[in-house]
Amino acid sequence: MHSSLSQKHNQKSILSDDNLRKKLEFNRKQSEKQDQTELIEKCTQEFKYENCSHQYWNPIEFSLLHGTYLWEQASEKQKILLNQIYWIAYYSQIISAEVATIFFNQVAGAGLFAMEDFKILCDALDLESRQERCHINAFKTISEEAEWELFGERIFSYPMRGVFEHPTVIHWSNNQLKAQIRNLKLYGYVICASNSPFLASQYLTIRGIRTLNGKLVQHKLSKYYSGAANKETISIPSAISYHHFIDESFHFNTSKTIGLELLDYLPKPNTFDKWIVNKLISGCQEDHNSFSVAINGIFWHDPALFKQIHKILKSKFFGFDSKDIKYIMEKCFTEESDGMHGSYATYKTARESYIMFLDNLDFVEANNRKMHIMSKTSVEATLKTNKQALKKFFKNNEI
Ligand SMILES: [Fe+2]
Ligand SMILES: [Fe+2]
């Protein structure tokens, strides 16, 4: 009866299509049944760095500077450390992405709730926001405790901050003007999306693209736990990678459903709406237009990490002097290596998956459809950028 009333208001209800309704209800039941919140909270409470300080937390190839000169020279103990630091750096980046997700889930929910029968999807977004708070708490607690035990100071972790503060260390230029322009664009989107179901729905397309690479990498990270014969012996951070991946798989389904599959149930976009969505997609391309030799699977500019890598090499775990550090950093960042090619391969896979993800959206412009901005990134260009930036870094820090 509800759906027929909706149709009287000239709106096609998402619940009027039996297959779609069944799919949405099934997704809701499964995501509630498989909610990992309690397990993640238990893991977080039980975490003690000393209990897993001797263990790998990720598959070995997901280690800081894996496949580079440093990795080849490192002792087993140092390799374990580089593996743990990868976990800390990776999930510290995820924190900033998930802080943004919580905010924009709310905005999208507000825009979509104006449509008949969208309650089921708005409820899904609420559940996801609650889960993200639990994820953030887990990543933050573990990263901070591990860094404190290891270094006595922060390396990749950071104090809690809001969505409009500068996000992690993705960009090395740290340009204040650019950050302010970015925020102004976001404010504009928030105002428009909370009043436009189409624009609200397209946050989920953007979220889908932005998390697609995460899904590929986190699936591999989760296998360290799920593939272990004896799970009792696996570290808590590895278990968290697994539990997090389960929650995120449902989040990705929501992104796909709302962003790509429900457009027929929403008012048609006008030229301005389409222009905004294309701007958002090219913004994703710009954010993802580099790959990191240091951390395979994150699209960070390596120069943004020089300071942290320098600190790690100088720490008691490596104990290198300035001359050694200079030599090692040059070898790792300015010469080709298996590590660099591995990161580039992940980058190319991500780009291809973005292209496939957007394939059915007819309003996506050619530049975005082909991920043109991302296609300019190459090993040669990365080496060139790293060479220039490293020279500057040594000079500025008198190394
Ligand atoms: Fe999450
Ligand atoms: Fe998520």
Image (cartoon, rainbow, N blue to C red):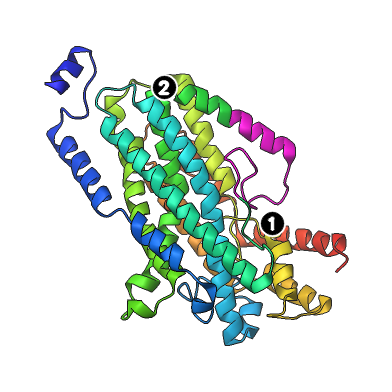
Q: Position of residue 368 (x, y in %)?
A: 49, 39
Q: Earlier in the sequence, mark 2 or mark 1?
A: 2
Nearer to the camera, 352 or 308: 308
- Under tag 2, what secondary structure? loop
Q: Position of residue 301 (x, y in %)?
A: 65, 56
Please identify the quadrant where the C terminus is shown. Answer: bottom right
Q: Tag 2: residue type?
A: Ser
Q: Is residue 384 above or below residue 2?
A: below
- Which span is picked out in magenta? 160-185
Q: Is residue 25 visible?
A: yes
**Relative horizontal placement of residue 297, taking residue 151 as reference (left or right):** left
Taking the magenta stretch, the answer to whether it contains residue 21 is no
Q: Is residue 366 above or below residue 137?
A: above
Cα separation, mark 2 vs mark 1, equals 37 Å
Task: Locate residue 357: give its quadrant.
Answer: top left
Neighbour tally class for label 2: few under 14, some 14-19, many 20 plus, Cα within 10 Å: many
Q: Tag 1: residue type?
A: Ala
Neighbour tally class for label 1: few under 14, some 14-19, many 20 plus, Cα within 10 Å: some
Q: Residue at x 54, y 57 (%)?
A: 140
Q: Position of residue 38 (x, y in %)?
A: 34, 57
Q: Residue extending furthest bottom?
A: 75
**Label 2 sits on residue:** 196
Q: Residue at x 68, y 33 (%)?
A: 180
Task: Locate residue 300: give its quadrant.
Answer: bottom right
- Under tag 1, what secondary structure? helix
**Relative horizontal placement of residue 334, taking residue 67 as reference (left or right):** right
Q: Is residue 151 above or below residue 134?
A: below
**Label 1 sits on residue:** 304
Q: Residue at x 15, y 31 (%)?
A: 17
